[in-house]
Image (tube, rainbow, N blue to C red):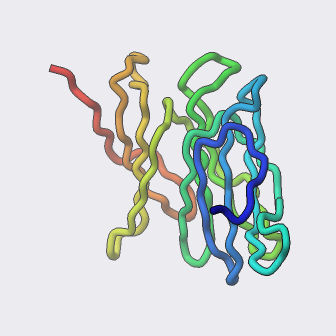
């Protein structure tokens, strides 16, 4: 049994977060049947309304493969990974971090960064050291092979920093 269904376009990732007691749901879409320029959606979950999922905002994020929420000093950020750039026909793509505006209940572009067929994101807080973000790339950035790699970044001063270390899968 489900509460409500709502239209979407090839969802590849769903992320939730809570701000000031309100629950938000972000649906990352990847394809609208014609192109990968499908718009992702930010919804407000309206617990006491007849329509539970209230559309808050359309987000222009092409070919979303992964969404991940980051929390830093009371602020909310959404990392949106783009797997494929259909303009250049490459897995080298522009991924983004958005900042959540608590007053407006909306996401604003914050930072762009390059990924290589991104498929997974994880983050953790290291005691007295800050926030770290691991990005799983499906394509090797050096030779475009399908060996992929994981890069570890620090999220410092509310920005994703250049990678600290990368782990490349070695075949042998």
Give the number of callouts: 0
**Residue 157, image quadrant:** bottom right
Q: Residue furthest left?
A: 172
- State the image coordinates of residue 51 (x, y, percent, origin top left): 83, 67
Q: Residue furthest front?
A: 1
- State the image coordinates of residue 148 (x, y, percent, origin top left): 37, 29
Residue at 38% x, 17% y is 145
Nearer to me, 135 or 58: 58
Q: Is residue 122 left or right of residue 48?
A: left
Nearer to me, 3 or 89: 3
Residue at 54% x, 71% y is 72
- State the image coordinates of residue 130 (x, y, percent, origin top left): 41, 68
Residue at 67% x, 21% y is 86
Residue at 82% x, 56% y is 57
The N terminus appears in which quarter of the rendering? bottom right
Q: Is residue 57 left or right of residue 149?
A: right
**Residue 53, image quadrant:** bottom right
The C terminus appears in which quarter of the rendering? top left
Q: In this view, does 58 lie to the left or right of 100?
A: right
- Residue 155 drawn above or below residue 29: below
Nearer to me, 163 or 53: 53
- Residue 99 drawn above or below residue 31: below
- State the image coordinates of residue 131 (x, y, percent, origin top left): 43, 64
């Amino acid at each position: 049994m489900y509460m409500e269904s709502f239209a979407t376009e090839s969802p590849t990732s769903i992320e939730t977060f809570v701000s000031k007691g309100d629950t938000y749901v972000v649906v990352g879409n990847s394809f609208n049947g014609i192109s990968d320029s499908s718009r992702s959606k930010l919804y407000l979950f309206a617990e006491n309304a007849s329509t539970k999922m209230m559309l808050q905002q359309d987000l222009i994020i092409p070919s979303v493969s992964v969404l991940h929420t980051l929390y830093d000093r009371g602020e909310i950020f959404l990392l949106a990974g783009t797997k494929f750039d259909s303009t250049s026909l490459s897995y080298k793509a522009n991924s983004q971090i958005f900042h959540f505006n608590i007053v407006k209940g909306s996401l604003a572009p914050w930072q762009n960064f390059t990924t290589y067929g991104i498929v997974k994101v994880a983050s953790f807080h290291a005691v007295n050291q800050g926030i770290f973000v691991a990005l799983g790339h499906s394509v090797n950035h050096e030779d475009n092979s399908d060996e992929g790699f994981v890069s570890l970044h620090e999220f410092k001063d509310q920005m994703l920093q250049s990678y600290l270390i990368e782990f490349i899968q070695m075949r042998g």
